[in-house]
Image: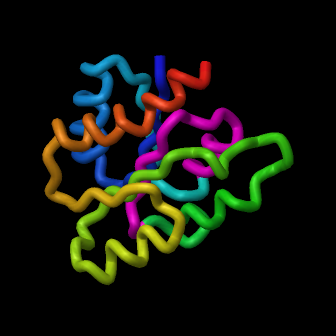
Amino acid sequence: MKRVLIIEDDRDIVELVRYNLASEGFEVGSSPDGSSGLAQVRKSPPDVLLLDLNAPEDARPRSLQGNPPGLALNRLPILMLTARGEESDRIVGLEMGADDYVTKPFSPRELVARVKAFAAPCRAAQ
């Protein structure tokens, strides 16, 4: 079972995403803040990370680059999930190290499809 971690402070969004991903066979964890979310990532890296662009600085994708040796977080697919939808915001998110960018409000079906696309290479590697 592929694991997804959501770092998002909006409980309604977490539950919507959790429900839709769990329905597709994903194990879904969540954290309401960047610090505890990154602690979870470092302890047990998920297959895909969903991250709110408004997360604190320590939870941004570039902060994952300073991971301990042997922990391949640099290969962790990161999808930004954010209300910021302007082109400049998308560019900033991608430049920060995100692999994809989804704006709120979003289609749960589209989000699931994007997560599946990132989780698929993980399946092939096992």
Furthest-bottom residue in this view: 88
Query: Start and end of the magenta stretch?
Result: 36-54
Query: Residue 84: percent from the left, percent from the top?
Result: 26, 72
Query: Residue 54: percent from the left, percent from the top?
Result: 40, 69
Magenta-span inclusion, residue 52: yes
Most foreground residue, 94 or 8: 94
Q: Residue at x 49, y 31 (%)?
A: 121
Q: Residue at x 52, y 71 (%)?
A: 96
Most foreground residue, 86 or 23: 86
As drawn, 99 above or below 43? below
Q: Residue at x 23, y 29 (%)?
A: 20
Quadrant housing the C terminus: top right
Q: Left or right: where does residue 109 sit relative to residue 10?
A: left
Q: Left or right: where does residue 10 sit relative to residue 48?
A: left
Q: Residue at x 22, y 38 (%)?
A: 16
Query: Residue 10: percent from the left, percent from the top?
Result: 30, 53
